[in-house]
Image (tube, rainbow, N blue to C red):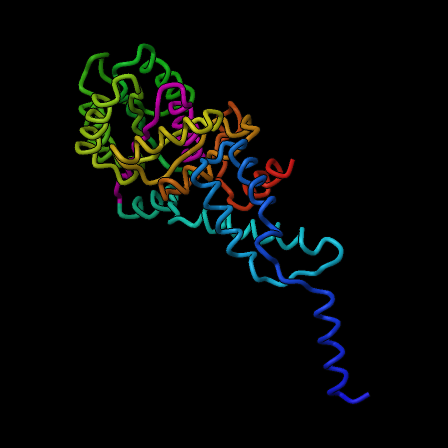
């Protein structure tokens, strides 16, 4: 058989084995996908955009007619679309603290989020993480409003054997942060972690208070702490804090208990800020770096159910 004839036959076989993906091939799939993403706490606007981007990526592509070729192709394409949605500038808190400490500079990190989100416990976990690495830490209780806030952080400081700066209830929260930063600078401490109030029922006053703390303490980083179990409420909170105060990264508490898992994707997409850690339990060691690939595998598993 001539080489030319062989090539012609191979081309004919290829045309039989493959087909072009058409709009009608994916219409029902995309509608179902949007519903499943919303059920997993992915924001509706994001679910629509994911579906639109998936359709654009699929249309006109060649896939095998037989076997699981089309299913595998859609799955791989969807994963790539989701990875693109998670492409935001990363923040390395530990690396930044290490770099600044070389020059004897203190790194100030301000934590924001509503009451009940797990903010204070997350701060304690992060303090534990830093101490395990070998960094020195001071905690600042700039929540001088919520009853029990000072005592809660104080207990963590005692357990972690870490200095804590506080003032009586009703004091100016910014002054507590200022004292903590000055203490850290004069004692060569690597990091200041500032706990703040989170009473959303007086949102305007809260945001003004947080803005003042930020002006006074001049943190290198502001971190939003959200409750993964809060679903779309966590996204709404992230929007408010990001637009009013601004933050550089997010940590999601109670991530291990979240059976839906869409909050992280929605927050990263909406704010363009990375989720850097997730809480995976009650212990001080239960704070792990966020892995986009592991997260997507889990999320896609939920969507497929």
Q: Position of residue 168 (x, y in %)?
A: 22, 12
* Residue located at (45% from left, 35% from top): 43
Q: Quadrant of residue 121?
A: top left
Residue at the limit of the structure toward the top, as seen here: 147
* Residue located at (17% from left, 34% from top): 215
**Residue 280 versus residue 6 in the image, above or below:** above
Q: Position of residue 166 (x, y in %)?
A: 25, 19
Q: Quadrant of residue 62?
A: bottom right
* Residue located at (43% from left, 50% from top): 87
Residue 120 colored in magenta in the image: yes
**Residue 164 versus residue 99 in the image, above or below:** above
Res. 192 in view: no
User: Which of the two residues, 156 or 250, is positioned nearer the viewer here?
Assistant: 250
* Residue located at (31% from left, 21% from top): 198
Q: Position of residue 297 (x, y in %)?
A: 59, 43
Write the start and end of the magenta stretch as one range: 104-132
User: Which of the two residues, 18 or 201, is positioned nearer the viewer here?
Assistant: 18
Q: Position of residue 249 (x, y in %)?
A: 36, 39
Q: Quadrant of residue 225?
A: top left
Residue at the limit of the structure toward the right, as seen here: 1
């Amino acid at each position: 058989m001539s080489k030319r004839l062989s090539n012609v036959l191979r081309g004919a076989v290829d045309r039989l084995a493959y087909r072009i993906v058409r709009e009608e091939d994916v219409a029902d799939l995309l509608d179902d996908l949007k519903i499943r993403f919303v059920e997993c706490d992915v924001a509706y606007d994001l679910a629509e955009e994911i579906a639109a981007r998936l359709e654009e990526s699929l249309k006109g592509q060649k896939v095998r007619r037989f076997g699981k070729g089309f299913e595998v192709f859609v799955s791989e394409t969807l994963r790539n679309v989701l990875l693109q949605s998670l492409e935001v500038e990363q923040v390395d808190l530990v690396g930044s603290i290490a770099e600044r400490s070389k020059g004897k500079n203190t790194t100030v990190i301000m934590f924001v989020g509503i009451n009940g989100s797990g903010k204070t416990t997350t701060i304690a976990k992060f303090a534990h993480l830093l101490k395990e690495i070998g960094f020195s830490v001071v905690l600042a209780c700039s929540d001088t409003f919520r009853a029990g806030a000072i005592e809660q952080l104080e207990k963590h400081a005692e357990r972690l054997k870490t200095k804590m700066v506080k003032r009586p209830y009703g004091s100016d929260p910014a002054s507590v942060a200022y004292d903590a930063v000055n203490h850290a600078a004069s004692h060569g401490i690597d990091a200041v972690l500032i706990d703040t109030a989170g009473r959303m029922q007086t949102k305007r006053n809260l945001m003004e208070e947080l803005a003042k703390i930020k002006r006074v303490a001049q943190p290198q980083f502001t971190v939003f702490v959200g409750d993964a179990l809060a679903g779309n409420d966590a996204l709404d909170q992230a929007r408010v804090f990001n637009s009013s105060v601004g933050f550089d990264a997010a940590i999601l508490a109670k991530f291990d208990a979240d059976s839906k898992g869409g909050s992280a994707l929605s927050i990263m997409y909406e704010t363009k800020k990375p989720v850097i850690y997730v809480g995976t339990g009650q212990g001080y060691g239960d704070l792990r770096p966020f892995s986009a690939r592991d997260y997507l595998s889990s999320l896609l598993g939920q969507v497929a159910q």
